[in-house]
Image (tube, coloured by chain):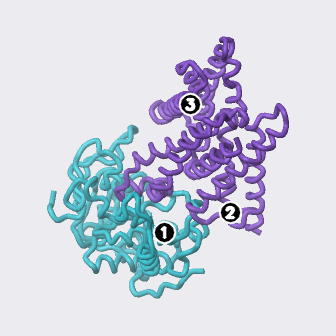
Chain colours: A cyan, B purple
């Protein structure tokens, strides 16, 4: 495994009991990239994220996260799970959820105070949600909920962001806001690795890619790794979108209109 | 008696918040029904009517039944509600058989064991209130002390684990708190209906509040008020069991909150 890599796996296999979800994946994500993990449904993308975080036990292989075992380093990772992983009917407003990102450093017995609330508010402002800080999370749109999750990671000031489909089902304003934040974090020297589903935006949004379909089909800087042959191999010949489609407006520099 | 009712109502109501948000209401019902063999077993082991022994027995058999349901679901691939139904039925049946055996023994009639079926607040002795108070202080104290940890483990357990929170430990703690919420009211409300006193105040409180802390204490207040009203009403009516009255009051409160609650009630939708 390469030292200095943000994420490195060697021969990683995961099996949920009905066939392998991941098989012999040796992934090396260099520090400082804004990377995507792509592949068809059921390719094991979410499983890879969870295995990298040590949330599912591998059947074989090893994981190094920020250079050490995930159980020792994962608290330094800003994990953004899929939006559907929680019940948004929970009694909390946006600021409450973002503040939860600070509970670990507070320790089990201390309550968040003014300093923590202000840090949470600042993170919400960074994702363009400052004006919705006190809104109940169940009354936010899907894109706004996703931005709350990103702010909960942002407030930790992590070295690495691991995001599971952060752009799935979000509105254009949220997509632009999320992308702008991830680019700004990368510019600060952070590493970003996101599960992504939209091949049409892949080249515009990311500079590094891993193509996965149970096994790892290719990885590397996007221009080198993302070839038509690899795409056809990963998606079994059914590529959902042409890889070199018309470039869509990238999120950087866009004004984020506050959604009401 | 009134103090005991308020105490158990507040504790069950407040701790019920976590049961409802974690979708564990049915687990509470399993624990309550399966507490009956533990109550009778505790009585048999102590050789006399000893509330600490009976509550300890209730905790043990309630947790065993919940554990059995967990094993059926997670290890043997039985559907969750079928597994819970099995745990509930098995525990309760065992309890009823034990109870009918014990009640034919001399001296058992005065132990008030049958009050554990439908609840009799008047059966709560002064010494019992001290025991219940101790359990309540421990349950509410643990929940208050670890409130933030319990919050993250309830809202987003997978993320919380990745963030370095001790979620497995917190899960065990929350299961323990649910068991406390259930056993504390067994004598006054009864094993059959106890889970309603855990669930109904939290359902009502969810309609009225915007934060977990507010929901927790509102559920506690509504639980305490329901238990007190039920205890007073049943005490004023000879032969009326406390449990059904408490549950009717708590359910009426929940129904009103669902209709009129400012946060999510039907009126708020309009």
Q: Which mark is residue B58?
A: 3
Q: Position of residue B2 (x, y in %)?
A: 71, 44
Circle 1 is placed at which residue position? A146
Looking at the rendered image, the quarter that the N terminus of chain B falls into is: top right
- Looking at the image, residue B45 sits to the left or right of residue B206; the answer is left
Q: Chain of mark 3?
A: B
Report the Cα–Cα distance between label 1 and label 3.
Answer: 44 Å
Question: Are there few (<14), some (14-19), or many (20+) residues within 10 Å of tag 1?
Answer: many
Circle 2 is placed at which residue position? B208
Point 73% across, 63% down: residue: B261
Q: Position of residue A195 (x, y in %)?
A: 38, 63
Q: Is residue A33 above or below residue B133?
A: below
Is label 1 in a helix, a strand or a loop?
A: helix
In depth, the one of A135 and A107 nearer the eye is: A107
Is label 2 in a helix, a strand or a loop?
A: helix
Point 42% across, 81% down: residue: A251
Disc 2 vs disc 3: Cβ atoms closer than 8 Å? no
Q: Is residue B47 above or below residue B134?
A: above
In depth, the one of B169 and A229 nearer the eye is: B169
Q: Chain of mark 1?
A: A
Is label 3 in a helix, a strand or a loop?
A: helix
Point 68% across, 44% down: residue: B5
Report the Cα–Cα distance between label 2 and label 3.
Answer: 33 Å
Q: Position of residue B192 (x, y in %)?
A: 69, 33
Looking at the rendered image, the quarter that the C terminus of chain B falls into is: bottom right
In depth, the one of B231 and A197 nearer the eye is: B231
């Amino acid at each position: 495994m390469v030292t200095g890599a943000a994420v490195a796996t060697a021969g990683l296999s995961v099996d949920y009991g009905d066939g392998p979800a991941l098989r012999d994946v040796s992934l090396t994500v260099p520090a400082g990239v804004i990377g995507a993990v792509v592949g068809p449904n059921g390719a094991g993308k979410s499983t890879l994220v969870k295995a990298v975080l040590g949330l599912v036990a591998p059947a074989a292989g090893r994981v190094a996260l920020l250079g050490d075992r995930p159980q020792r380093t994962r608290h330094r990772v800003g994990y953004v799970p899929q939006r559907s992983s929680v019940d948004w009917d929970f009694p909390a407003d946006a600021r409450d959820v973002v503040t939860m990102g600070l509970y670990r450093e507070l320790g089990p017995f201390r309550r968040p105070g003014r300093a923590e609330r202000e840090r949470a508010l600042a993170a919400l402002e960074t994702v363009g949600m400052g004006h919705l800080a006190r809104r109940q999370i169940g009354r936010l749109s899907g894109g706004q909920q996703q931005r709350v999750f990103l702010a909960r990671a942002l407030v930790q000031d992590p070295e690495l962001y691991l995001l599971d489909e952060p752009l799935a089902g979000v509105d254009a304003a949220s997509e632009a806001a999320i992308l702008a934040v991830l680019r700004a974090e990368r510019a600060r020297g952070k590493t970003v690795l996101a599960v992504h589903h939209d091949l049409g935006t892949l080249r515009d949004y990311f500079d590094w890619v891993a193509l996965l379909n149970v096994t790892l089909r290719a990885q590397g800087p996007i221009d080198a790794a993302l070839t038509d042959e690899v795409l056809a191999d990963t998606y079994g010949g059914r590529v959902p979108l042409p890889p070199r489609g018309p470039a869509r407006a990238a999120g950087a520099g866009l004004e984020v209109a506050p959604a009401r | 008696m009134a103090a005991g009712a308020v105490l158990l109502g507040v504790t069950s109501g407040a701790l019920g918040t976590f049961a409802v948000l974690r979708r564990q209401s049915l687990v509470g019902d399993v624990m309550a029904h399966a507490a009956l063999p533990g109550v009778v077993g505790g009585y048999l082991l102590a050789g006399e009517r000893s509330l600490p022994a009976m509550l300890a027995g209730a905790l043990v058999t309630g947790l065993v039944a919940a554990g059995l349901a967990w094993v059926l679901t997670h290890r043997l691939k039985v559907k969750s509600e079928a597994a819970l139904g099995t745990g509930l039925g098995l525990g309760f049946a065992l309890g009823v058989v034990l109870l009918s055996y014990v009640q034919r023994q001399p001296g058992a009639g005065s132990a008030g064991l049958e009050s554990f079926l439908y609840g009799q607040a008047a059966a709560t002795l002064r010494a019992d209130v001290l025991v219940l108070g101790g359990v309540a202080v421990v349950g509410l104290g643990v929940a208050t002390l670890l409130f933030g940890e319990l919050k993250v483990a309830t809202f987003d357990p997978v993320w919380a684990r990745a963030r370095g929170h001790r979620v497995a430990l917190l899960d065990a703690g929350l299961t323990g708190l649910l068991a406390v919420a259930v056993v504390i009211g067994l004598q006054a409300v009864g094993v059959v209906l106890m889970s309603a006193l855990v669930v109904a105040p939290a359902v009502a409180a969810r309609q009225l509040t915007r934060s977990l802390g507010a929901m927790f204490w509102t559920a506690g207040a509504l639980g305490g008020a329901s238990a007190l009203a039920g205890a007073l009403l049943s005490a004023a009516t000879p032969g009326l069991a406390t449990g059904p009255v408490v549950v009717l009051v708590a359910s009426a409160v929940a129904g009103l909150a669902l209709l009129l609650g400012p946060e999510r009630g039907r009126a708020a939708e309009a």
